Image: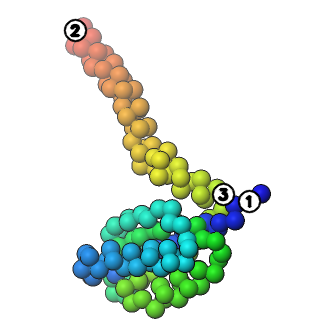
Amino acid sequence: MSDPQRSYEITFIVDPVLPGEEISSTAQTYVDLLKNENCDIVHVDAMGLRQLAYEMNKRSSGVYYCIEFNAPTGEVIAKLELALKRDERIMRFLTVKLDKFGVKYNEDKRKGLIGKKKKQQEETADAPKAEASGAAKADDKQSKDAE
Protein backbone atom coordinates (compact mmCIF):
# COMPACT_ATOMS: atom_id res chain seq x y z
CA MET A 1 0.00 0.00 0.00
CA SER A 2 1.45 3.37 -0.99
CA ASP A 3 1.42 6.57 1.02
CA PRO A 4 -1.72 8.64 0.23
CA GLN A 5 0.30 11.84 0.63
CA ARG A 6 1.93 13.20 -2.51
CA SER A 7 5.39 14.71 -2.19
CA TYR A 8 6.26 17.91 -4.01
CA GLU A 9 9.10 20.40 -4.14
CA ILE A 10 8.73 23.98 -5.30
CA THR A 11 11.73 26.17 -6.01
CA PHE A 12 11.29 29.88 -6.66
CA ILE A 13 13.48 32.91 -7.20
CA VAL A 14 12.67 36.14 -5.35
CA ASP A 15 13.70 39.54 -6.72
CA PRO A 16 16.93 40.48 -4.86
CA VAL A 17 16.31 44.26 -4.76
CA LEU A 18 13.58 43.85 -2.12
CA PRO A 19 14.40 44.60 1.54
CA GLY A 20 15.62 41.56 3.52
CA GLU A 21 12.51 41.18 5.66
CA GLU A 22 10.26 41.32 2.59
CA ILE A 23 12.26 38.56 0.90
CA SER A 24 11.82 36.24 3.88
CA SER A 25 8.15 37.21 4.29
CA THR A 26 7.60 36.29 0.62
CA ALA A 27 8.78 32.74 1.31
CA GLN A 28 6.71 32.61 4.50
CA THR A 29 3.62 33.63 2.50
CA TYR A 30 3.83 30.44 0.46
CA VAL A 31 4.62 28.26 3.47
CA ASP A 32 1.46 29.64 5.13
CA LEU A 33 -0.58 29.10 1.95
CA LEU A 34 0.50 25.44 1.89
CA LYS A 35 -0.27 24.97 5.59
CA ASN A 36 -3.75 26.45 5.07
CA GLU A 37 -4.34 23.83 2.36
CA ASN A 38 -3.57 20.98 4.82
CA CYS A 39 -0.09 20.34 3.44
CA ASP A 40 2.76 19.11 5.63
CA ILE A 41 5.90 21.20 5.23
CA VAL A 42 8.85 18.80 5.20
CA HIS A 43 11.66 21.32 4.73
CA VAL A 44 12.21 24.94 3.75
CA ASP A 45 15.62 25.63 2.26
CA ALA A 46 16.67 29.28 1.96
CA MET A 47 19.48 28.85 -0.55
CA GLY A 48 20.28 32.55 -0.55
CA LEU A 49 21.50 34.94 -3.20
CA ARG A 50 22.80 33.20 -6.31
CA GLN A 51 24.01 34.27 -9.71
CA LEU A 52 21.54 33.54 -12.52
CA ALA A 53 22.56 31.69 -15.67
CA TYR A 54 20.98 34.46 -17.73
CA GLU A 55 19.41 37.83 -17.04
CA MET A 56 15.75 37.87 -15.93
CA ASN A 57 13.78 41.09 -15.44
CA LYS A 58 17.08 43.01 -15.82
CA ARG A 59 18.52 41.13 -12.83
CA SER A 60 21.63 38.97 -12.87
CA SER A 61 21.05 37.39 -9.44
CA GLY A 62 18.14 36.18 -7.33
CA VAL A 63 17.29 34.83 -3.89
CA TYR A 64 16.44 31.13 -4.11
CA TYR A 65 13.98 29.26 -1.88
CA CYS A 66 12.99 25.61 -2.01
CA ILE A 67 9.97 24.24 -0.14
CA GLU A 68 9.47 20.48 0.13
CA PHE A 69 5.98 19.47 1.19
CA ASN A 70 3.43 16.66 1.24
CA ALA A 71 -0.10 17.30 -0.02
CA PRO A 72 -3.22 15.16 0.38
CA THR A 73 -4.17 15.86 -3.26
CA GLY A 74 -2.57 17.62 -6.20
CA GLU A 75 -5.25 20.31 -6.25
CA VAL A 76 -3.14 22.70 -4.18
CA ILE A 77 -0.55 22.95 -6.98
CA ALA A 78 -2.83 24.94 -9.30
CA LYS A 79 -3.69 27.38 -6.51
CA LEU A 80 -0.04 27.74 -5.49
CA GLU A 81 1.21 28.29 -9.03
CA LEU A 82 -1.50 30.88 -9.73
CA ALA A 83 -0.42 32.81 -6.62
CA LEU A 84 3.23 32.62 -7.73
CA LYS A 85 2.38 33.85 -11.25
CA ARG A 86 0.50 36.85 -9.84
CA ASP A 87 3.24 37.78 -7.35
CA GLU A 88 5.53 40.44 -8.83
CA ARG A 89 8.26 39.60 -6.28
CA ILE A 90 8.70 36.12 -7.80
CA MET A 91 10.94 36.01 -10.87
CA ARG A 92 10.61 32.27 -11.70
CA PHE A 93 9.33 29.09 -10.08
CA LEU A 94 9.36 25.36 -10.69
CA THR A 95 7.15 22.70 -9.12
CA VAL A 96 8.27 19.08 -9.14
CA LYS A 97 6.39 15.98 -7.97
CA LEU A 98 8.84 13.78 -6.07
CA ASP A 99 8.86 10.01 -6.38
CA LYS A 100 10.20 7.76 -3.61
CA PHE A 101 13.75 8.20 -4.91
CA GLY A 102 13.49 12.01 -4.85
CA VAL A 103 12.17 11.93 -1.28
CA LYS A 104 15.01 9.60 -0.22
CA TYR A 105 17.59 11.80 -1.96
CA ASN A 106 16.33 14.93 -0.16
CA GLU A 107 16.37 13.12 3.21
CA ASP A 108 19.95 11.96 2.65
CA LYS A 109 20.99 15.44 1.56
CA ARG A 110 19.55 16.99 4.75
CA LYS A 111 21.38 14.36 6.84
CA GLY A 112 24.65 15.31 5.15
CA LEU A 113 25.13 12.01 3.35
CA ILE A 114 25.08 13.75 -0.06
CA GLY A 115 26.63 17.02 -1.14
CA LYS A 116 29.27 19.37 0.25
CA LYS A 117 29.78 17.62 3.58
CA LYS A 118 30.55 14.32 1.89
CA LYS A 119 33.09 16.01 -0.39
CA GLN A 120 34.77 17.61 2.63
CA GLN A 121 35.01 14.21 4.32
CA GLU A 122 36.61 12.74 1.19
CA GLU A 123 39.10 15.62 1.05
CA THR A 124 40.11 15.11 4.67
CA ALA A 125 40.50 11.37 3.99
CA ASP A 126 42.75 12.17 1.01
CA ALA A 127 44.81 14.72 2.99
CA PRO A 128 46.86 12.16 5.00
CA LYS A 129 47.78 10.39 1.74
CA ALA A 130 49.00 13.68 0.27
CA GLU A 131 50.99 14.47 3.43
CA ALA A 132 52.53 11.00 3.38
CA SER A 133 53.60 11.35 -0.25
CA GLY A 134 54.98 14.83 0.52
CA ALA A 135 56.99 13.40 3.40
CA ALA A 136 58.34 10.65 1.15
CA LYS A 137 59.49 13.25 -1.39
CA ALA A 138 61.20 15.23 1.37
CA ASP A 139 63.01 12.07 2.53
CA ASP A 140 64.16 11.39 -1.06
CA LYS A 141 65.49 14.95 -1.37
CA GLN A 142 67.39 14.67 1.92
CA SER A 143 68.98 11.38 0.85
CA LYS A 144 70.05 12.92 -2.49
CA ASP A 145 71.51 15.94 -0.69
CA ALA A 146 73.47 13.61 1.60
CA GLU A 147 75.04 11.86 -1.40
Q: What residue is rendered at 57% in x and 54% in y?
A: 105
Whichever of labels 3 and 2 marks the residue nearer the N terminus, that label is: 3
| Residue 35 position within the rendered picture, expressed as x and y whole percent measured from the top left | 49, 74
* Residue under label 2: 146
The quadrant where residue 128 appears: top left
- Camera-side mark, 3 or 1: 1
* Residue under label 3: 100
- Camera-side mark, 3 or 2: 3
Q: Indicate the amino acid at tag 2.
A: Ala
Is 108 rendered above or below residue 125? below
* Residue under label 1: 2
Is 115 rendered above or below residue 16? above
Mark 2 is surrounded, within 10 Å at the Cα level, by few (under 14), some (14 to 19) or many (20 or more) other residues, namely few
How far apart are labels 1 and 2 at the CA level? 73 Å
Q: Indicate the amino acid at tag 1.
A: Ser
Q: What residue is rendered at 55% in x and 71% in y?
A: 39
How far apart are labels 3 and 2 at the CA level? 64 Å
